[in-house]
Image (spheres, rainbow, N blue to C red):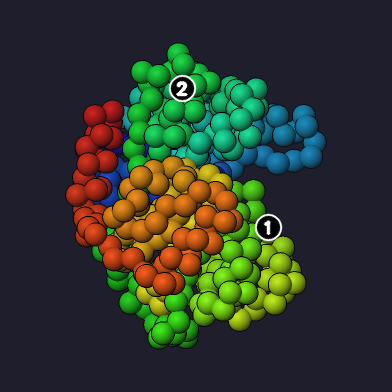
Amino acid sequence: MKKLLFAAYSLDIGGIEKSLVTLSNYLQEKEYEVTIVLEKKQGTFLKELNKNIKVIEYKPDESKNILKRKIKNLWNRLKFIVKYKNKFDFSASFATYSISSSFISRTASKNTCLWGHADYLTLFDNCETEMKEFFVKRNYNKFKHVIFVSKEGRDSFIKVFPEMKEKTLVCNNLIDGEKIKKLAEEKIDEEKDEGLTTFINVGRHDEKQKKLTRIIEATKRLKEEGYKFKVLFVGDGPDNELYKREVNKNSLQENIVFLGRKQNPYPYYKIADCVILTSEYEGYPVVFLESFILNTPIITTKVSDYEQVEGKYGYVTDKKVEDIYEKMKLFIEKGFKIKEEFDSERYNKEIVKKLEKIF
């Protein structure tokens, strides 16, 4: 039985964390021995891991005393090296933002992997210098493999680090289709408004990436033209209050409803007619897969892998309010009929087949 290790920061609610849990459970069920190392052994998703998955905490010292912090962190590293040096067949830094995860992965096996969840060049506003600094701090060139969850992420990485081309590959996130369908059946207080088109946005309220002001502005225009509809915002984040102020300023309280963060967002997909994603950038949008599985059409901006949506599962829009407004209007007037049933099991098998080649 091959031993796999994944290193991350925590298992709090988030796209990376959800992807790690889904991947770990799937691999454990295929009889791999899976270990997860976390900087903080906490988070809602901890209880969703299969019971046979081992979780270890590797907690860096955060003391304000620099000398004390350096000594304790050096001691922690030495202990980890003694106990786990090359004890695994494969090890991955799954949370790229975590520097400790990079060290853990490079220690635990010779078959090391850095996992990229974004188009980092876009993330760093096309500043190659900042992107280089980010990856140098994570010793990117000491990894045997670099996986990206989208083609766009891989392409931007190769543009900045062309010497790494042969080490990179694309593996989209896995998805637990049966679990999502089951969770979608849970009862909620809200009910579907029959005869009223309902859009839903699920995700972190972070304007730099998610650009929910685009939805608010498009909603304002549609309301002014007399269209009857509403938008559900499921999630929270640093710009939650900004969005509420914009909604109140434009008197859109009846059109845009803030439902807050939901551990289980899937029943809300079922009371919506259309998912709407207006992000400036994404890694691989898990919301695509969720909407495919729940047979909810989607409107999306041209983020990573938007081609999977176009013509089959919904409408694709430019990143301009005008075009988002037009696509929302089109959906209100004509709807969208999904052209192809999504097979999540076949999708997962194809991805795992790629991964098993490097395990």
Question: Which quarter of the figure has residue 237?
Answer: bottom right
Mark number displayed over residue 290: none
Question: Which quarter of the figure has residue 164?
Answer: top left
Residue 6 is left or right of residue 323, and the answer is: left
x, y percent for residue 158: 46, 22
Hey, which residue is sitting farthest top in the picture?
Answer: 163
If you read the primary sequence from the N terminus, does the residue marked by circle 1 or circle 2 appear first?
2
Mark number displayed over residue 158: 2
Q: Residue at x 49, y 28 (%)?
A: 156
Question: Which quarter of the figure has residue 343?
Answer: bottom left
- SS for dot 2: helix
x, y percent for residue 78: 55, 27
Q: Which residue is denoted by mark 1 in the rendering?
A: 238
Quadrant of the image for the C terminus?
top left
Residue 178 is left or right of residue 143, and the answer is: left
Q: What is the crowding at mark 2: few (fewer than 14 residues within 10 Å), some, or many (at least 20)?
A: some
Q: Is residue 267 above or below residue 203?
A: below
Q: Nearer the viewer, residue 190 or 136?
A: 190
Q: Nearer the viewer, residue 146 or 223?
A: 223
x, y percent for residue 99: 58, 33
User: Which amino acid type is shown beneath numbered disc 1?
Assistant: Pro
Residue 18 is left or right of residue 293, and the answer is: right
